Amino acid sequence: MRSAASYSASLARFPAGFFARPSPTVSPELIGALLIHDGKGGRRVGRIVEVEAYLGDGSDPASHAHHGPTKRNRSMFGPPAHFYVYRSMGLHFCVNVVCEARGRASAVLLRAVEPLEGIEALRRARGGRRDRELTNGPGKLAQAFGIDLGCDGRSALRGPLRLAPRDAPAQVLAGPRIGISKATALPYRFFVAGHACVTRTPQNRRARPVALPG
């Protein structure tokens, strides 16, 4: 895989229609992609190593969209390839990428990234936490990258906060989502096997390999 510096500076773009698909399809293909934020304190870049898919068709009671659109989740019902950011438990922010067509409210939660650039900025944002605790969780990730409600509804393909596609496949596992109390058996959590930034949980033992295209 190319270095983050050369890759994030390239003109790489996601293929047309990449995000206009169900979130369980998009999710494993986001593993290895780059999250880039050119914000205060300089550029911060991380490689995505853990995500979760949430549906918007009424079949997923753990999804914010399960009971329809609200002021809080309206970005989730917007067009694909945009960010949906929300405050969790009044304490921290979580960032998702919207999938499928407008009104479907399918989304991918970014759970963890591997820091690649702007490490000092990430450390400052996280109040001097140990490096292995900088971005190994959705709230930690958002804090480290300076993501808040001001990023809600923005394009995920351009602007200061954006995603760039991976240029090499990664070994990806699929298993049950965590940190929720409903629909816990759905295998919609995707992550890099054995990665230090992935959430450590007994659920990892139930994960199975995913076949990626290409």
Image (spheres, rainbow, N blue to C red):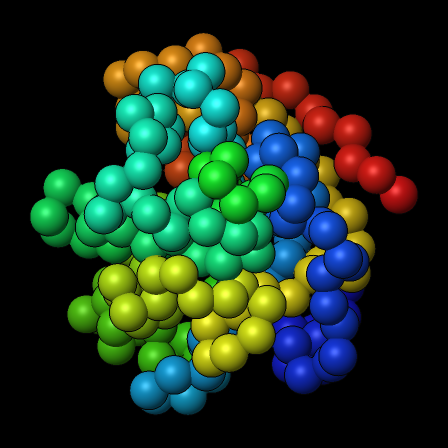
Q: Is residue 144 left or right of residue 118?
A: left
Residue shown at the point (71%, 50%) measured from the top left: 18
- The residue at 84%/39% (across/down) is 213
Instruction: Choose top left, top right, bottom left or bottom right for residue 64.
Output: top left
* Front in this rendered view, residue 182 or 111: 182
Rendering quarter of residue 21: top right
Vertical comparison of 137 with 159: above or below: above
Q: In this view of the protein, which residue sits in the foreground, 195 or 19?
A: 19
Residue 26 lies left or right of residue 195; in this view the side is: right
- In this view, which residue lies farthest toward the left? 90
**Residue drawn at (60%, 41%) of the image:** 100
Question: Is residue 56 shown above or below 109?
Answer: above
Residue 47 appearing in the image = no
Which quarter shows the C terminus?
top right
**Residue 174 visible in this rendered orientation of the protein:** yes
Residue at 74% in and 81% down: 10
Residue 163 % position (x, y): 58, 64
